[in-house]
Amino acid sequence: MKKENRKQKDTAKKRERLKRLFTALFTLIIVLCAPMAALAAGNPTADSLWQTIAGLLSTWIPRLGGVVMLVGGIMFGLGFKNDDAEQKSRGIMTIVAGAIVMAIAMLVNTFFGL
C-alpha cells in the first residue's frame, strides 16, 4: 500500500514537472514569435510574412538541433562515467536526433533557398 502511494506521488511530481516544462517552452515560443508580428506589421504582404517566418525558422531550428546534440553528448558522457549502458544508448539516440533535426533544417534551407 505504501509503495503504491509513493509511486502515485512520484508520478504526480513528474507530471507537475512536465507541465512546468511545457509552460516554459510555450512561453519561450510566444516570446520568440512576438517580434515576427512587429516586423510583419510594417509590410503586410503575405510574401514578407513568409520570408520573416522562414528566416526565423531557418536560423533557430539548426541551433535547436545543436543544443539537442549537446545535451545528448552530456548524457553520453555521464553514462560513460557511470558505466551505465542504458544512459549511453539514450545519449547516442539524443545526439542522432539532434543531428536529424539539424540536417532536415539545412535541407529545407537548401530546397527553399532561404
Image (cartoon, rainbow, N blue to C red):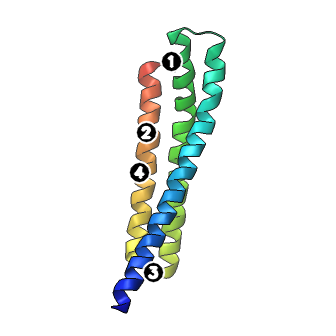
User: Could you classify mark 3 by the number of other residues whose Cα lies within 10 Å: few (under 14), some (14-19), or many (20 or more)?
Assistant: few
Please tell me whether mark 1 or mark 3 is closer to you in this view.
1
Q: Earlier in the sequence, mark 3 or mark 4?
A: 3
Which one is closest to the eye, mark 1 or mark 4? Answer: 1
Q: Which residue is mark 1?
A: 50
| For marks 4 and 2 on the same chain, the one whose residue lies earlier in the sequence | 4
Query: Looking at the picture, how far across and down is residue 29, in whole percent?
Result: 56, 40
Q: Which residue is mark 4?
A: 97
Amino acid type, label 4: Ala
Q: Tell me the number on the disc at residue 103.
A: 2
Distance Cα–Cα, label 1 vs label 4? 27 Å
Q: Earlier in the sequence, mark 1 or mark 2?
A: 1
Q: Position of 85 compared to 68: left or right?
A: left
Residue at 44% x, 78% y is: 9
**Whole-percent x, y for residue 11 in the image:** 41, 73
Q: Is residue 101 above or below residue 4?
A: above
Mark 4 or mark 1, which is nearer the start of the sequence? 1
In primary-sequence order, the first of circles 1 and 3 is 1
| Residue 108 horizontal/vertical position (percent) | 43, 28
